[in-house]
Image (cartoon, rainbow, N blue to C red):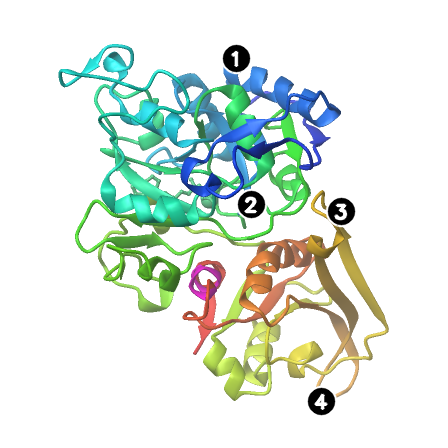
Amino acid sequence: MSQDLPRMKTRVLRVPEKDLGKFRGDEEYEQSGLWEVSQTPSPSLQILHEAADYLRTKDTPVAFPTETVYGLGADATRSSAVRGIYTAKRRPADNPLIIHVSDLDMLRRVLTPEDTTNGTTNGKTNARTNGTTETIHDRIPEIYKPLIERFWPGPLTILLPNPTPSKLAPEVTAGLKTFGVRMPKSPLALSLIKLTGAPLAAPSANASTKPSPTMAEHVLEDLDGRIELILDGGPCHVGVESTVVDGLCDPPLILRPGGVSIDELRSCAGWEKIEKGYKDQSESGKAAPRAPGMKYKHYSPKAKVVLYEASFAAAKDGIQSEDFDAFVQNRQSQEDPHVGIIRTRYWKPAAGLQCGDFEKRETVKTETSQGSQEAAELDVQETALYDTTSGASIGKLMDISIGADTRSIAQGLFSALRELDRRGADIIFVEGTVDDEDIGAAVMNRLRKAASRIRS
Ligand code: TXA
Ligand code: MG
């Protein structure tokens, strides 16, 4: 624990996502994004009202779930509050934050320069006086409209020009002329933003460099004592962060792969020629990354991660003996090694390492407010690890399967890395997935960043 902050008491408050509100209209909610917070009092709403008051007045951020990962939120219009995020996370201040809006009107207000909201805009009357009237002068660039219609609310972040003067605290954009924004799908996130009445700046709620949190427990692991409030809405459904796109350049670019796939983006009008504007570790180039956050070490558990690319994993039986031997030889510690395995499609339990029978199969289950079929579950098995030549027991093997399907791999990935850390893994061998299947590129991007060795 660093000396930079007095230690706080951190409270984790359970907030079931059921019955918090609804979208106005059923069919066209995606276009209008008009989230209405329920008028019926409930314990959950009571907590959200208190959290919203806290966000309006205090300078310490509040952790809350979104459908991608947990975010660490602050009122994006108040500098002192936004600075609190950087402090709590120990995040470098040159890495801009994205903002979260509950509806398009809130976004239009951000796009309107600070001093013209209630007056005139370029000689035209600003027609928007309530939540529903269309603006004469819509500042949302046309290029983004097909994406907003299709993917909002959801895991997509777009870059927009930041007006001058801007309502956003300068700390949000870290000196850039653009800001990133998304409308989350989680009812809890939408209600919290709406009740706060301001866009929330929110990066992922992990300590910088750690895997992003997909459960409230993960936030507590990283930020206990550094924030006061963690809102627990159960596990996140997507499990990796939003896709970040820049449509202000030609061709448009993907700056960070995430919960919306490149194929989904390509199928939208104006986005057919979208290009990859980021580079993974295995394709390392010298060019500066376009999204400032992409240059930092990220997503790393304490254990060393060895990643097997999908093609390599498919062609081989499992973990290669030379990789395992190299790990054993390079170990400093005299303690028995703890070896973690994260499997996806091809690897069998233990991935070819010599071990005892898997006697105990443990399912680490977390309650979710969305109903049991969406519960985040990890299949963890532990057994003794044997030396290949002598047959003696030399340590512990911990094996987790996160499923063969790309969506389930994405959902379980960060959780599995953290679970193995918690169980004391020294090394984690991970079976990768393919980039071009659904959101596989997001999974592999995170894994390549976490890995200290990549087998391909
Ligand atoms: O799913 C998500 O996006 C999560 C949840 C909490 O919403 N949030 C999140 O925020 O991942 P953060 O701050 O950890 O990541 C935002 C990414 C970073 O890579 C940052 O560098 C990039 O977006 N970014 C933000 N503003 C930008 C800008 N104006 N230009 C280029 N990149 C920007
Ligand atoms: Mg992050």
- Residue projecting furthest to the top: 119
Q: Position of residue 1 (x, y in %)?
A: 60, 33
- Between the residue at mark 2 and the residue at mark 3, the CA separation in whole angstroms equals 15 Å
Seen in the image, is 299 located left or right of residue 229?
left
Measure the C-alpha gap from mark 3 to mark 1: 32 Å
Range covered by the magenta-colored residues = 440-445
Q: Tell me the amino acid under the disc marked 1.
A: Thr
Kind of residue sitting beneath label 4: Thr
Principal secondary structure, stretch drawn in magenta: helix
For marks 4 and 3, give the one nearer the viewer. 3
The numbered mark at residue 67 is: 2
Residue 60 visible in the shown view: no
* Residue with the mark numbered 3: 367
For the point 70% across and 86% down, the residue is 388
Q: Residue at x 22, y 56 (%)?
A: 287
Q: Residue 298: which numbered mark, if any?
A: none
Q: Is residue 91 left or right of residue 213?
A: left
Tag 2 or tag 4, which sits nearer the N-term? 2
